[in-house]
Amino acid sequence: MDCLPFYRSSPACGTGGHGILFGNLSVLNPRQQINGLTSFLDASTVYGSTPAIENKLRNLTSEEGLLKVNNKYYDNHREYLPFTDRIPSPCAQDSNASEGERIECFMAGDSRSSEVTSLAAMHTLWLREHNRLARALKNINGHWTAETVYQEARKIVGALHQIITLRDYIPKIIGPDAFNLYIGLYTGYDPTMNPTVSNVFSTAAFRFGHATIQPIVRRLNAQYLDDPELPNLHLHEVFFSPWRLIKEGYNDWREFCGLPKLETQTDLNRVITNHNVTKKLMELYHNPSNIDVWLGGLVEDFLPDARTGPLFACIIGKQMKALRDGDR
């Protein structure tokens, strides 16, 4: 391979000025990177973030506005994601399989859909939901064109994404108090709201979810019990794209959120009650200001009825409010 397509290495236009959403943490606003995905909660994981990807995912010969499905494999007549057209794909293969039995990576709106089996399952559910809705809409509105059916089904799927995210998911991870403080009730579209996704949200705060992934991938039967014919898998056996980001900034972002700056291990002990953790942090970083924002935010004590501490609740809450209120 001659090069890797790494969007985050390119500077975004207009960086260097003052950001509207997250302001300025220094005299000169730092260089920002290009977001290769859409910012909005628009189900781009299902439909892609560009017209080119969207067209690759659509079944353009269907009169029902369907998405493409796998033509080789089915799950008891239920649809699977189509295989990528990049052959051979980088996905691992069964060492006992012949060359003709290759199982390529799946193709979905997000290129990471084959990262782990549980993620592929989620992408598969959304594919099936779009096609279910499209067939139902066409059955009710037989005069609709395939394009109309597709777009209307996509609107519904996008709405489902937003409802599940903002009604069911975000309140559970940042807690009801932080939700009311940073997001609040929806009062309508705000044209002054900048819905840009911030670096600290995408690369640190919202990555807290990586720490919630279980090390064992359980494969269940129809009764949601472990299937004796399909043993559990270790995550490292199915995860093909690990990464790590180490960069200080923990205290800077605490100050941005109006939280006290932490100077000593005693200060850390007030937000992290596991003192063995704070001791190890000080041994590794020597000063709280050297702590990576992702790690620091990850080990803070959870807020009541939440899955995140004060820092990540603030960053996630501010970002979600911007995405909701800045979406026409």
Image (tube, rainbow, N blue to C red):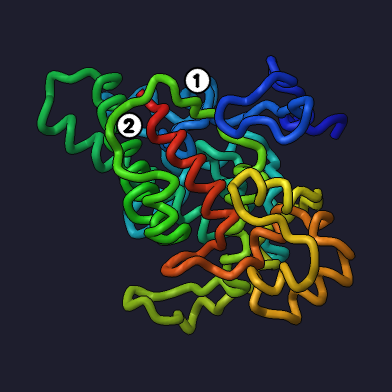
Residue 325 figure quarter: top left
Split into 4 quadrants, where in the image is the C terminus?
top left
Q: Residue 132, percent across and down? A: 26, 42
CA gap, disc 1 and disc 2: 14 Å
Q: Residue furthest top?
A: 14
Residue 281 placement, left or right of 157: right
- Residue depicted at x 73% and y 55%: 242
Q: Nearer the viewer, residue 17 or 236?
A: 17
- Residue type indicated by callout 1: Pro
Split into 4 quadrants, where in the image is the N terminus?
top right
- Residue type indicated by callout 2: Arg
Q: Residue tagged by mark 2?
A: 154
Query: In this picture, is 31 found above or below 131?
Result: above
Q: Residue 281, percent across and down? A: 81, 69
Q: Residues within 10 Å of mark 1 (few under 14, many from 20)?
A: few
Q: Residue 122, percent across and down? A: 44, 53
Residue 33 figure quarter: top right
Q: Nearer the viewer, residue 283 or 58?
A: 283
Whether residue 281 is visible: yes
Q: Residue tagged by mark 1?
A: 51
Residue 140 figure quarter: top left
- Residue depicted at x 79% and y 61%: 263
* Numbered disc 2: secondary structure: helix
